[in-house]
Amino acid sequence: MIRALMFSLVLGIATLLPLSIPTATAGEPQTVTLDVPGMTCKFCPITIRKALSKVPGVIEVKSDYESKTATVTFDPEKTGLSDLTEATANAGYPSTVKTK
């Protein structure tokens, strides 16, 4: 009987341990679309992609000349919307967050 109680106690403690150990997790990636009205040629999206890709925390960038937009997936714990719009502005293409 004592063995069964000890086993139950050890098993109960073992199941609680993973809950008490802190884990480091990255922020949930977010995706935003930026309006970039200053795109005037087919090479503009390349410049915008390069500028946004250099921002720490940016995971993926897609820019489109036809719609004059850039879609950015990023880690919100490492960067924010102001950093993204600042990057495009510094590259010569001011942008704003697109509202749906």
Image (cartoon, rainbow, N blue to C red):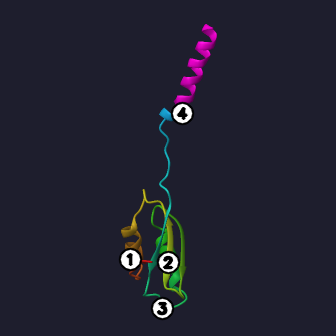
- In this rendering, which labeled residue sits more in front, label 1 or label 2? 2
Give the answer, above or below, for where 79 lies relative to 98.
above
Q: Is residue 3 magenta?
A: yes
Between discs 2 and 4, the one toward the N terminus: 4
Please state, as top left, top right, bottom left or bottom right, where the C terminus lies in the image.
bottom left
In the displayed image of the protein, which residue is found farthest to the top?
A: 2
- In this rendering, which labeled residue sits more in front, label 2 or label 4? 4
Mark 2 and mark 1 in contact (Cβ < 8 Å)? no
Which residue position holds label 1?
90
Which residue position holds label 3?
40
Between discs 1 and 4, the one toward the N terminus: 4
> Residue at coordinates 39% horizontally, 68% vertically from top-left?
81
Q: How dense is the environment of label 4, judged by Cα within 10 Å: few (below 14), some, or many (20 and up)? A: few
Mark 1 and mark 4: Cα distance apart in space:
46 Å
- In this rendering, which labeled residue sits more in front, label 3 or label 1? 3
Q: Position of residue 9 (x, y in %)?
A: 56, 18
Three-letter code, disc 3: Thr
Please provide the residue range marked out in magenta.
1-18
Q: How dense is the environment of label 1, judged by Cα within 10 Å: few (below 14), some, or many (20 and up)? A: few
Which residue position holds label 2?
70
